[in-house]
Image (cartoon, grey):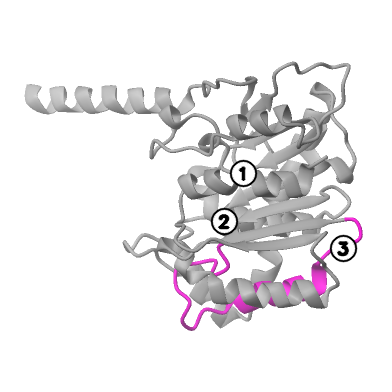
Amino acid sequence: MKLKLSVQLIFNLFFSMFLLQAQSIPKVENGTIERIEKLSSKYVDARNVDVWLPDGYSPKKKYAVLYMHDGQMLFDSTTTWNKKSWDVHKIITRLLKEGKLQDLIVVGVWNGDKSRHADYFPQKPFENLDAKKKELVLSAARNNGVSVFGNYQIQSDGYLKFLVEELKPLIDKKYSTRKDAAHTFIAGSSMGGLISMYAICEYPNVFGGAACLSTHWPGIFVTKDNPIPDAFVDYLKNNLPNPKQHKFYFDYGDKTLDAMYPSLQKKVDEVMKTKGYNEKKWITKYFPGQDHSEGSWRSRFEMPLEFLLGK
């Protein structure tokens, strides 16, 4: 009995230490981070929001805003689950010093952990599927057999309402921001790339540009007999915003999970051309040899930054 109790105490201690590390505010060498702790919402589970302010931030100036998903992975590798991060603050600081970017702040919205896939999976394309195809998607599992969606229903419309109706007004009130769509951007990778695409299509009057890195066009983790990629393409055909006021950045590699993307991204690229997007309003970059990881996204993040927020 004592042995079992000791083991349980040790487990609880390590679990508490893990949670403490996961909840700690990222340390950054450039700028500062202010946390909005466990921001509640009537649409999705409460979550942290980390706001990065550049060196010299001043309420006397106005700043563009870059909203980014998977906020816990952006700044400090010592606080992430895999000990990797985008190092967003370092890249932006360098580009600001080089005079290549407009003034901006970054709003890192934490994912909902177990609800991440349900939060980020574009809802309207899913709802346009017939009942049989919906069941195929919802019953999908990862390679390890774990359910993709768990007990969550797809709720990305609610997640976007959280961003637009609850978070953005809070950010615009608390910080010195440029509130218009021309200075409001959204970015993410993998499922974060999907929800960034969906956000600008659903709220073209809120977001002026989207950066979609390693966009997870399969939606689940198989391509054979998967109705989702075509559903996303059909959605884009009918919902892409006006190219005169909006910008899209897509990219992909060809290793690990990115190996699924080349043929699917080409279908999306054809839609972009058909809908009147040119090289000034849309680019797709292919990075042979790059994989599906924070290291890859970090290595090329300056490209969407300059494309969307360049001076």
Residue 109, relative to residue 148: is it above or below? above
Identify the element where label 3 is drawn.
loop
Q: Is residue 238 magenta?
A: yes
Residue type, label 1? His
Residue 209 percent coordinates (x, y): 78, 51
| Magenta-colored span | 216-245
Specify the quadrant that holds the N terminus. top left
Kindly indicate whether the residue at mark 1 contacts the one at mark 2 (C-beta within 8 angstroms).
yes
Local SS, label 2: helix
Q: Quick check: marks 3 and 1 in contact, CB under 8 Å? A: no
Q: Which of the two residues, 176 or 9, is positioned nearer the viewer here?
A: 176
State left or right for residue 112 relative to residue 142. right
Tell me, for residue 243, which label it has, or none. Answer: 3
Dot 3 or dot 1: first in sequence order is 1
Gap in angstroms between the C-alphas marked 3 and 2: 23 Å
| Number of residues whose C-alpha sits closer than 10 Å to that of mark 2, classed few (under 14), some (14–19) or many (20 or more) | many
**Between marks 3 and 2 in the image, the one whose residue lies nearer the viewer:** 3
In primary-sequence order, the first of circles 3 and 2 is: 2
Q: Nearer the viewer, mark 3 or mark 1?
A: 3
Q: Nearer the viewer, residue 4 or 70?
A: 70
Which residue lies under the disc numbered 1?
69
> Disc 3 to disc 1, how far (Cα)?
24 Å
| Rendering coords of residue 108 (x, y %) | 63, 35
Amino acid residing under circle 2: Met
Label 2: which residue?
191
Q: Position of residue 246 (x, y in %)?
A: 84, 56
Per the rendering, the mark at residue 249 is none
The magenta stretch spans residue 57: no
